[in-house]
Image: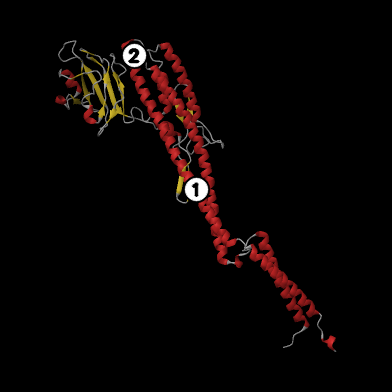
Amino acid sequence: MRISSSLLSKIGIETMLDQQKRLSDTQLQIATGNRILAPSDDPYGSARTLDLKETITTNEQYLTNSTQIENRLALEEGTLEGIGNALQRIRELSIAANNDSQTTESRSFLRAEIEGLLKQVLALSNTADSNGEFLFSGYQGKTKPFESDGAGNFTYYGDDGQRFLKVGTSTTIAMGDSGEDTFLDIKNGNGVFQTADNPANQGGGIIDPGTTFGSYVADNYRIGFLPPNSGLLNDPVEYYVLDGAGDIIEPAAQVGMAEAAFTAGAFPGIAYEDGAVIQGLDQLGMKVTISGTPAAEAGPPLRQDFYTISPSNNQSMFKTIQNLVDTLGMPQQGTADLSEFHNAMNRNIIDMDQSIGKMLEIRSNIGARLNTIDKQIEINESFTLQLKSTLSDIQDLDYSEAVTRLNMELVGLEAAQNAYTRVQGLSLFNFL
């Protein structure tokens, strides 16, 4: 085979270029710190690197989401703490106002302070975050949630939506609570049923909020009072209890009888005892007492006091506070007025307890969410560290090996250059 001078030159140049490329690649590896410069360098490693980088990016987004939720929940918790403090103060003022040592004038001062606290609660319920989004508007973040018409009526312009963010592969956290759930969906009364007096009552009876036990049977019950069946004025008044259909459930001897037939037939009722548990209701899972002096006078027409027990309904926090304001403006002269006032105040105070309980419930949920986020952040940070360590093992350069290789490639390039120079100097004419 004949080897020409041009072939020798070509081989020498290709050798130098190959050595130069290897040297350049090694220099680039050292400059970037990456072992893999192109997918062809390590196809499996390149694919694995892309997967790891995507997972790390997703995990870092989870950490960003966690920080965002933490900040928003911290703001909400602080806002609810302020509302809770205002509610506690309102309750203290209500207890003071319900005391018979107060005068109409002193109650007016308490009323003015409660009105101020109502405005404070309304303002806090319209709190916005640093992005200008209202905390309690649900999905309607840019809509101011609550407005007052100035006449004691309040309107909610948000919805019941609750936004969630992922903070882990299988963990999603609510980043807030809607105004509907926080301020509107609050049961009145004792949370199961509500007791009330008839506004037309003439006596001084005060019904308590009542409690449940055993198996509560929901219905609209009514307690009616009658003059003593004996006809003796000094004997205690008597009462009977009706179910939602208007039929007698107590006295037991007349169970199922219609009210009109019972009162017309002059049947004996249950002798009233101040503060004693109302009979009949205790068989239906309720413990209710009436204290004071309910009124009943023989007719015609029959004049009698009534009290009702009905299932609890949702009542907004603002309505509860406004009811207190309205109650403190009621007439407070005479037995009937004072009885109506104290019955209303008792209802307002128990309703206020429900609002305070709701605040504690929401804050407890926020605390649980914050604890979950803290634990998830620890998991995500640990996982990210492991992923980055694995990624480093795959793509990061071993500098000691690379520097050694660089030196060898420099020597190789110099050798190729020297060989090329010497080959270029060879010619048959030098030996003739």
Vertical arrangement, residue 59 with respect to residue 317, above or below: below
- Residue 91 or residue 158, whichever sits in front: 91
| Residue found 25% across the figure and 20% down from its top | 275
Please tell me how crowded label 1 is: few (under 14), some (14-19), or many (20+) other residues with Cα within 10 Å. few
In front: label 1 or label 2: 1
Choose top left, top right, bottom left or bottom right for residue 332.
Answer: top left
- Residue 84 or residue 235, whichever sits in front: 84
The residue to which callout 1 is attached is: 378
**Under tag 2, what secondary structure?**
helix
Vertical arrangement, residue 142 with respect to residue 348, above or below: below
Does label 1 or label 2 sit earlier along the sequence?
2
The residue to which callout 2 is attached is: 338
Across and down, in percent, residue 112 comes to: 46, 17
- Residue 69 or residue 138, whichever sits in front: 69
Vertical arrangement, residue 2 with respect to residue 191, above or below: below
Across and down, in percent, residue 130 comes to: 56, 36
Which residue type carries mark 2? Leu
Disc tally is: 2
**Under tag 1, what secondary structure?**
helix
Residue 140 visible here? no
Choose top left, top right, bottom left or bottom right for residue 25.
Answer: bottom right
Q: Is residue 245 left or right of residue 327?
A: left
Which residue type carries mark 1? Glu
* Contact flag, marks 1 and 2 (Cβ < 8 Å): no
